[in-house]
Image (cartoon, helix red, strand yellow):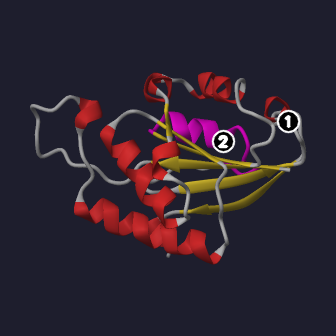
Amino acid sequence: MKTLYIVRHAKSSWDHPELKDEERPLLDKGKKRTKKVVDFLLTKGVSLDSVKSSHAVRALETARIIAHAVHFPVDDIIVEKQIYHASAEQLFNQFNDLSDNIQSLMMVGHNPTFTNFANYFLDSGIEWLPTSGIVSISFDTESWVDIMKAKRKTNFVVYPKMI
């Protein structure tokens, strides 16, 4: 069984127009909302074997908040620049080098890509994955490269306004 967590970064700041898009930090409001979602994850007993994040500051900060809360070593977060510019289809490349010993993977990135990526797996698609939103899907397979053809189950779709 494999479990995938698709996470959109927390709400970020637009207060510094001189910053490149990938340098925008999180707002305090975004951090607080992410902590609400983290509390939900803790009630579900979520544990992670691997975390991959976009290199953008807002995504990496979100990944660190969640990783720390669920006791995943923050220094083990894999920063993947490709996630920042990837299409939903290109995100499947993130599974190619993933060890099948890993049972749970969290990917942290951006819209619209992450909404489109989540909709590949959801029976009832979502219009938009809000900031700090998380989609969790389990796959009945032992290999990450086989998840597209594996039976799957949506564990939850959660975002701060739901909590």
Asked if the residue at tag 2 contacts the one at tag 1, i.e. Cβ–Cβ closer than 8 Å, the answer is no
Q: Residue 75, how many percent across, how many down?
A: 46, 46
| Mark 2: secondary structure | helix
Q: What is the span of residues highlighted in magenta in the rendered image?
A: 110-125
Q: Name the residue under label 2.
A: 119
Q: Residue 93, how many percent across, how many down?
A: 66, 23
What is the three-letter code of the residue carrying label 1?
Ser
Residue 131 visible from this viewpoint: no
Q: Is residue 54 above or below residue 73?
A: above
Question: Is 142 in front, or is 113?
Answer: 142
What is the three-letter code of the residue carrying label 2?
Asn
Question: Is 106 in front, or is 70?
Answer: 70
Q: In this view, does 148 lie above or below 119?
A: above
Q: Give the residue at x 36% y 49%.
A: 61
| Mark 1: secondary structure | loop
Q: Is residue 40 above or below residue 77?
A: below
Q: Name the residue under label 1.
A: 143
Task: Determine the CA span between mark 1 and mark 2.
Answer: 20 Å
Which label lies toward us, 1 or 2?
Answer: 1
Q: Give the residue at x 85% y 35%.
A: 143
Q: Residue 161, how many percent across, how many down?
A: 44, 70
Q: Give the residue at x 50% y 63%.
A: 159
